[in-house]
Image: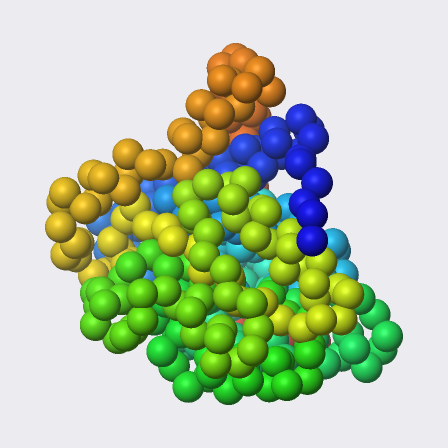
Amino acid sequence: MTTQAPSQGEMLDLYAVMVRIRRFELKMVEIFTTRIKNGDSPGALHTYCGEEAVAAGVCSLLRRDDYVFSTHRGHGHALAKGADLRKVVAELNGRATGLSRGFGGSMHLYDPSIGFMGTTGVVGGNLPLCLGTAYASVAMGKDSVTVAFFGEGAASQGSFHESLNMAAVMHWPIVYVCENNLYAATTHVSVNCPVANVADRAQGYGIPGVVADGNDVLAVRDAAAAAIERARAGFGPTLIECKTYRHHPHCMVIPEHRPPKEIREWRARDPIELFGLKLVAEGVATRADLDDIEAREVRALENAVESMAESPLPDPLAVADFLWA
């Protein structure tokens, strides 16, 4: 299967999405830190900084009627799939104008209108669920594809194996994307995964297993393009493993524990900086063009934060209406 090279506009869109995610996450860290210092307890915040190339590369190839199932580290997936920035900012801050009306928070973002079927705090909990939309697509004669993002820790859960097994047997249109950032909370992947690559586990189910550089947005895009094309054509699932690294600790309530040297080495391969250098070197954009993109994303984020600050808190009594909506 061949992959068409992205156009100049698509390359710039990829860059913009990655910048949007990064700026969003850094702003949320700032807001959550301030809230904690003021005695507020906004909960855990699992940031996606460092992994932006995975969400951007995969979701750039998806249609509105394709489905995405996300994880506890899912803000980037939501934004890359097209979720409204204002609504995501509002949801993380518990406002009624949020994606889940302020009742869900950081780990419970939903927007079925764009095929974003939710984030979850249950490790591997989204993997059985993705079978549902894949089955529905086939049953209705549609060529919609389902993407399930998950971490390498979830790849050692029973739900991972059960989901892959059924999808492979039924030839359902699913792209499994493992974001291997080396650590499941504080546990290194070598402790719970006996094989060199999570993608190698695809062999047990007779489906393709692909390893991609998760810090190279074009490498991720190429791997996803082949998998999505295969799924749409009715040939079944693919397992993609994206090797990447998160810049921040697991969440804001668990201290950093990873080796400083390892963190420095991975941060030197920042996916946004690497892609920006590539765009300039190949004449796709000038540094001024990239600065303009960043300025635009920062303005949009500032507007979203201002809108959130003016939004009401949800009415606790309305939760019952929300559950049955």
User: What is the total number of numbered labels drawn onto the structure image?
Assistant: 0
Q: Left or right of 91: which side holds 320?
A: right
Front in this rendered view, residue 210 or 224: 210
Front in this rendered view, residue 167 or 300: 167
Tell me which colouring the rendered structure shows. rainbow
**For the C terminus, which image quadrant?**
bottom right
Front in this rendered view, residue 269 or 251: 269
Q: Left or right of 88: which side holds 51?
A: left
Q: Is residue 322 above or below residue 178?
A: below
x 64%, y 85%: residue: 169
Instruction: Judge whether residue 150 can be spotted in this image.
Output: yes
Percent of width and height locating residue 6:
67, 35
Instruction: Judge whether residue 309 can be spotted in this image.
Output: no
x 14%, y 56%: residue: 257
Q: Left or right of 138: which side holds 112?
A: left
x 30%, y 46%: residue: 247
x 51%, y 18%: residue: 280
Percent of width and height locating residue 26:
37, 40
Q: Residue 155 appears in which quarter of the rendering?
A: bottom left
Percent of width and height locating residue 302:
50, 33
Front in this rendered view, residue 266 or 50: 266
Percent of width and height locating residue 322:
63, 74
Q: Left or right of 266: which side holds 2?
A: right
Q: Which residue is outermost to the right?
A: 141
Q: Residue 319 appears in which quarter of the rendering?
A: bottom right
